[in-house]
Image (cartoon, rainbow, N blue to C red):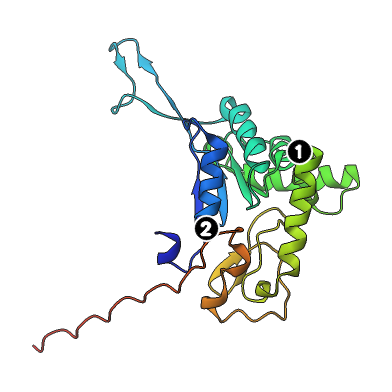
Amino acid sequence: AMVRATHLPVWAKLSPQTGDLTGVARACEEAGAEALVVSNTILGLAIDIEAAKPALGAGMGGYSGPGFKPIALRMVWQCAQAVSVPIIGCGGVSRAEDAVEFLMAGAAAMQVGTVSFIQPDAMPRIIAGLSAFCARKGIARVADLTGAALPEEARRRLAAARAAAAASPADAAAPALVGSAAGTPSATCGTRRCWPNACSPASPRSAPTRRAASHAPPGARPRPPATPPSPKPPPPAA
C-alpha cells in the first residue's frame, strides 16, 4: 500500500527479530521496495541495580553499536544472496574497516549512527578511510567492493542485476541504485535521490509517472501514479 501511495522511494528496514530473514527480504522486494535497510536494532535490557528495576522507562530498548555489528553484517550477507534490490547496511559501523566489511558482505551503502554521538567527525573519517583503502588495494571505485565477499553465484547475480539496470530503457526516468564512488546518495533525479555515476547527465528527470519501472523486481505489479491531495477550500471571508 505504501509503495502505491507515493512517488518517493520506499526502503524497508528489516528487524533482527524475524524468524525468516530472507523470506521477509524477498517479500519486501516483491511488494516493490526499492532498497532494504539491514538492520534495525535488537531488543536489549539494562538493569539499574541500585533501584532494582530496568534502566529504561519502557523496560526493553533497541541495542546497537559495535557489539551488534557481527549480527547486522551476517544479515546483510544473507539478504544480499536472496534479493536483487540494493541493501543499506547499518549497525555498528564506527571505522572505515567496518564499512568495508558491510560493502563486501553485499551492502551498497551504510548508515552511521551510534558512533556519531561519541565522535562527531566519524563520517568524514570513514569516507576518507574508504578512499585510502581503495587506493591501497588498487580499486577504482568504492562501489566495486560491494559483494566482494559473497559466494560466486551471488556475485554473478549482482553483476547481472547491475547490467540489467544499466540497460533498461526506463533508467532514463528512474536510475537504479547501483552504488557510487563515494558510497552515499547525493545526486538528485527528479522525484528521487539516486547514486552518483548511476545516471546519465542527459537523461530527462521530469516524468514521475515513469520513474518506478526499472526498480520493480520480476513479477512485481506496476506502481500507479500517486493520487494528488484534494485542494483545500478557500478560507471564509472575514
Q: Residue 70, percent across and down? A: 63, 27
Q: Is residue 236 above or below residue 92?
A: below
- Specify the farthest residue to the bottom: 237
The answer to whether residue 80 is seen in the rendering is yes
Front one among 139 and 86: 86
Q: Is residue 17 above or below residue 168?
A: above
- Dividing the image into 4 quarters, which one contains the C terminus? bottom left
The residue depicted at 49 percent of the width and 30 percent of the height is: 19
Q: Residue 20, percent across and down? A: 52, 33
Q: Are marks 2 and 1 in contact (CB under 8 Å)?
A: no
The answer to whether residue 197 is seen in the rendering is no
The residue depicted at 36 percent of the width and 15 percent of the height is: 47
- Specify the farthest residue to the left: 238
Q: Residue 38, percent across and down? A: 56, 41
- Which quarter of the figure has residue 23? top right
Q: Residue 54, percent across and down? A: 32, 19
Q: Which amino acid does label 1 sit on?
A: Leu
* Residue 34 left/right relative to 235: right
The residue depicted at 89 percent of the width and 42 percent of the height is: 137
| Count of numbered badges drawn on the protein | 2
Front one among 47 and 79: 79
Which residue is labeled 2 in the image? 32
Judged from the image, the secondary structure of the residue bearing numbered disc 2 is loop
Front one among 208 and 126: 208
- Which quarter of the figure has residue 228? bottom left
- Dividing the image into 4 quarters, which one contains the N terminus? bottom left
- Which quarter of the figure has residue 22? top right
Which residue is labeled 1 in the image? 150
